[in-house]
Amino acid sequence: MLRAENLRAGYGGGDAVRGISIEVAEGSCVALVGANGAGKSTLAKALCGLVTPRGGKVFFCDKEITGLPASDVARRGLCLCPEGRRVFGPLSVEENLLLGAYPRLSSFGPFRRAASGDLQRIYAMFPRLGERRMQQAGSLSGGEQQMLAIGRVLMARPRLVVLDEPSMGLAPVVVKEVFEAIRSLHASGMTILLSEQFAKIALALSDHAYIIERGSVVLEGASKGLAKNPAVVAAYLG
Amino acid sequence: MDAKYLALAQMAVGGGLMGMAYALVAYGFQLTHAAGKAVNFGQGELVMLGAFAGISLSGIGLPYWLSVSGAMVVGALLGWFVERIAVRLALQQRNEGWILLTIIVGLFCVSLVENIWGREDRPFPTPWPAGALDFFGISVTWPELAIAAGALSIMTLVELAKRYTMVGIAVQAVSADPDAAELCGIRSRSAISLSWAVSGAAAAFAGTVIGPVTTVGPTMAAALTLKAFSVAVVAGLDSGFGLVIAGVALGAAENLSGYLLGSGWREAPGLILLILALALRPQGIFGKKIIRKV
């Protein structure tokens, strides 16, 4: 469904992503595992158009999307839930969610009614967002903001969700909750690309994984196998 | 009431009503700054061009409201144009060249106006009744009331649109976080263009309501940009309510200093306010503290 070929990307001088090829099959959950600074986030941004690749190609649903602006990539159904959550702090929880469905909603019409079905679905998934729907997103706790960011990306009715570091900066108990949500999302058939430095959870959750070091894929394979690989255990699970 | 105080009050009220126009022009600064982190230093020239467009449209026989709407369309197009040709490229290259470029576009507009309409000041025709209204001995003319009513309704309309339409919410999202907005499928550039168009329309509208009070000429532009900039800086670039207060205060202060100290001092309060604001409270009296990320 999503395929990157020999992708290179970066900021300023050097490349943070040095020729990475990955593939995500429909309905699967694929993990990108690696330390902070390995290039996972740059890869996620390059796939979704937030960073223009310096080389290589990206295909989504058999069409090339290399270099398209992020808004166009999102409109095609490849949606990124960015690192650091990036909720719209001054806007309300509900407005944040509505913005997730922006391309689908009419600009001036009764957009709240048009999106009410999707909103109910998200509030059922994350009841705390429903309780706080009129609250400013910036006033939520980190965990709630992460749920809002996931809810916002789901409002787009994506065909593939890229989740970039969903556990970053969260308390362990909240991390568990967030990954529970991701697991049930995967169970419901959503295609997921998960970038995560917390290797143990990422490998437990995903079907397939790529281990990324210094901008390149150093290992790949079925997640179950990788979790038993001595090199991976030593470097990431020890 | 003592005749002297009455005259002072009269000056303050007249200036304050004019100050609503400064607030409206400054509001244009806020709109483009919120969306794209840049302002048009040729905003006063847009005010002037709006006024001239309005005069010409009523000159060819259009009714008042159509002339005003036409002037706003011209202003919107110009605002959009300035962003496209002067601001976008400079900001993409992360340099501050847009400041100079917007000033240059403004200067170009002044020459254009002098060539098309000439250098003389002109009256702006309005349908308002000629007389003045009397409030406790203070007289207020209809064109002055039109400034206040017009400025308030434009600002209210835009604020309502920002809160209650999906486009408005999207523009707010772009000002909060353009990348995250892109990820929602919002085209950040279109949202920024829209803000510049609305800002230009507001400036042109300000021209059509200021015109009947001050007459319209090529020299009105530079002073207006500076005054509106003072208002925006004093109020802070994120407080709509502060703009109205600061605009009214500046308008009143100008008239009073002109009356008490002589007409040469009319422009002084704006400059003093600007200097004080920049020195003492750069985020504005009503603004939130700016946290610069490293």
Image (cartoon, rainbow, N blue to C red):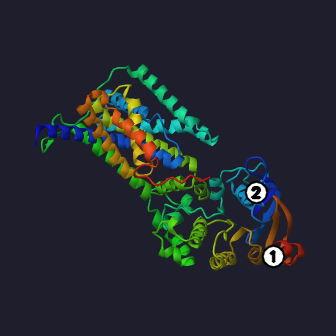
Dot 1 alpha-carbon crowd within 10 angstroms: few under 14, some 14 to 19, many 20 or more: some
Q: Is residue B45 above or below residue A154?
A: above
Instruction: Give coordinates of residue A128: x percent, y percent.
Output: 52, 76
The residue indicated by pointer 1 is: A237
Instruction: Give coordinates of residue B216: x percent, y percent.
Output: 33, 28
Q: Is residue B48 visible?
A: no
Instruction: Give coordinates of residue B200: x percent, y percent.
Output: 44, 39
Residue type beneath disc 1: Leu
Q: Nearer the viewer, mark 2 or mark 1?
A: 1
Q: Is residue B194 above or below residue A29?
A: above
Residue sitting at x 69%, y 75%: A186
Instruction: Give coordinates of residue B53: x percent, y percent.
Output: 38, 30
Q: Which residue is more in the foreground, B242 or B108? A: B242
Quick check: B76 left or right of B253?
A: right
The residue indicated by pointer 2 is: A59
Q: Chain of mark 2?
A: A
